[in-house]
Amino acid sequence: MGAGATPAIEVRDLETQIDTKLGLIKAVDGVAFTVDPGETLGIVGESGSGKSITALSLLRLVPRPAARIVGGEVILDGEDLLRKSEAEMRKIRGRHISMILQDPQTSLNPVFSIGAQVVEAIAMHAKGSRDSLLKRAIEALRHVRVADPARRVDDFPHQMSGGMKQRVVGAIALGSSPRVLIADEPTTALDVTIQAQYLRLLKDIQAETGLAIIFITHDFGVVARMCDKVAVMYAGRVVEYGPVREIFVNPAHPYTRALLKSVPTIEEDVERLYSIRGQPPAFWDMPRGCRFEPRCDVALPHCKQDYPPEFTDPGSGKTRHCASCWALEETEWTRNRS
Amino acid sequence: MKRYLIIRLFQSLLAMLAISMIAFVLSHLSGSPVDAMLPDDAGPEEAERLIRLWGLDRPYHEQYLVFLGNALQGNLGDSIKWSGQTAMGLVLDRLPATLQLGGFAIIVSTIIALPIGVLAAVYKDSPFDSFGKLIALLGQAMPNFWLGIVLIWVFAVTLNWFPTSGRGGLANMILPAIAMGWFQVAALMRLTRSAMLEVLDSEYVKLARIKGVPEWRVVWVHAFRNAAIVPLTYFGLIAGSIFTGSVVIETVFAWPGTGLLAIDAIRGRDFPVVQAVVLTFAGVFILANLIVDTLYAYLDPRIRYR
Ligand SMILES: Nc1ncnc2c1ncn2[C@@H]1O[C@H](COP(=O)(O)OP(=O)(O)OP(=O)(O)O)[C@@H](O)[C@H]1O
Ligand code: SF4
Ligand SMILES: [Mg+2]
């Protein structure tokens, strides 16, 4: 960590349980990361690895009544959000941490005007006359580059394109100038050009405001473009964590390497696309040892027995590069005490 | 919005026209409508008068136009059973009583069903939800006439809390309104509950929570405004079932409305009155649906701005 820089958000040992039909599962199992102001953390991992539940846990908005945060800390401004009352959390949501959801088509309330929805986001954390709130809402829409925002405030969601709606969602999420923004696959539903514009927009806003962004995605291309560091999630745990360059150039965990191999490049056609064999383990039937072991090409005999400890690259700089894999025992990487 | 409403209005008129045609055809089914419209003991000169009045010696399409013209002026012939009264006059005399009871039943069912439906969704799988399910199950399992009789027996005859029958103030309306409305409460409640469950699970409700919107506002503003569209579509149907219900309930409770009139008219083979009842019910039903469609457009901007 740089001298004196306090992280915008710090997550330690986060654990979230979900009571599913098939039993109690730990969808988030000891996740930890920090994000500094102006920094972007990417969270990648296959479907079902717990990325969204992690994100919702930070806001204390996990699906009720099935899910429950059972452990860890989420530190914001030196205070643990997991110890706050629901009333205190309401003042934090939108104001300090906010979130953009995946599908712009369903993220906006169909029966309220765009203006009303942005105004509400601002009014939750600020006082003011209707006029001044509306002015701020128009500014927020202008900020996310909605053209002619003074007129669009009277529009309803169904009158807008998907890309435009996602900008409105952005205006809602950023309306009260939060310091941390979680973006859960915000561009998956958009087509490619619109996607690029949207990512550009987030980058520009971040440069302007020093926003800390947690960016959830499947797409390593997006990670390369957007993120400063990456957390790779597998079966509810972070298996590798580090600066984005390190993760791309020097991936340490076999799962990360497999994910990187499955990234399509322009030259490769889909036929030859590498995909990781097998399925992630079922949460209700978690292996005792390494959760990736059944799919791992380099598994060692004791991988089945014990969950691998975390190892750190001794050459790591400010952002540590670490991974949980037994294979690192034989390298110069140092084992973290846990 | 304007276009939508004009289209709906036009459709309503068309529906009314179609119903008038059906009524016209029905009156001809049993041979000459003269037989249907006159008492059995009427003389030939009376038949002559009727034939001239309704143009029954002219071709069918002209007959229909005469019928339509008369109907538009509220003239559907004279009652057979209640001599000296017009069919329409009888119906209009009785209509307020039916609308009073039916309106009361609708309002009370709505006031009861919507909050229970919403709360049952919010507190899904709680004891409250089970209680709601029980109410719904009972409402849908008990036929309204049977419920009416049981209510009279328990609350009017045995406990003596309410009058057994007849039209009057609030006390007179309570038992028939329960008998008429319980089924509606059940249906409305279940619709509201399932609509709320779906909406509460939606992304925009999630986004509202992310903004920091308090939970009561999430439920009653963000979710309910959307969920309400579903039970509202059902209101048109309720308006209809209130009339069919009125035939049974007004008989059980001796409530002097159009439903009771319809039964008496059918028993007395009073065709003009039955026809007047049917056309009036159809008219009110179509009007109720027009109102529902207007409210619908008001609630749902996707319709308003099409
Ligand atoms: N409401 C819920 N009820 C029960 N189980 C849930 C619920 N939401 C998520 N889960 C389970 O929790 C686990 C993690 O889900 P999560 O949505 O966080 O995955 P994800 O990494 O975001 O996947 P995706 O990339 O598909 O969005 C999954 O196994 C999922 O089945
Ligand atoms: S711990 Fe063993 S099984 Fe797991 S990823 Fe490393 S080598 Fe493979
Ligand atoms: Mg997800």
Image: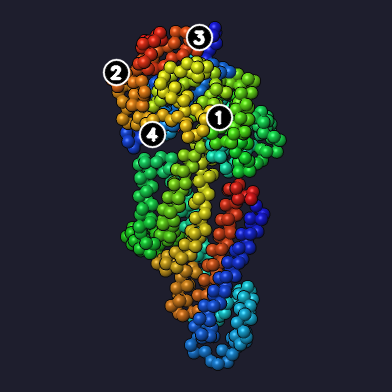
Q: Where does label 2 land, which residue?
A: A302
Q: From the Cβ of disc 4, is ligand 1 less than 8 Å away?
A: yes
Q: CA distance from mark 1 to mark 3?
A: 32 Å
Mark positioned earlier in the residue sequence (4 or 2): 4
Task: Give the mark nearest the N terminus, 3 or 2.
Answer: 2
Q: CA distance from mark 4 to mark 2?
A: 35 Å
**Residue type (three-letter) at the residue carrying disc 2:** His
In three-dimensional space, the C-alpha distance between marks 4 and 3, rounded to whole angstroms, equals 40 Å
Q: CA distance from mark 4 to mark 1?
A: 42 Å
Element marked by disc 3? loop
Residue A53: tell me if it is visible. Answer: no
Which residue is pictured at 52% across the width and 18% down the height? A244
Label 2 – label 1 distance at C-alpha: 39 Å
Residue B233 in the image: state x and y as whole percent: 52, 54
Residue that label 3 marks = A317
In the picture, the disc for residue A266 is: 1
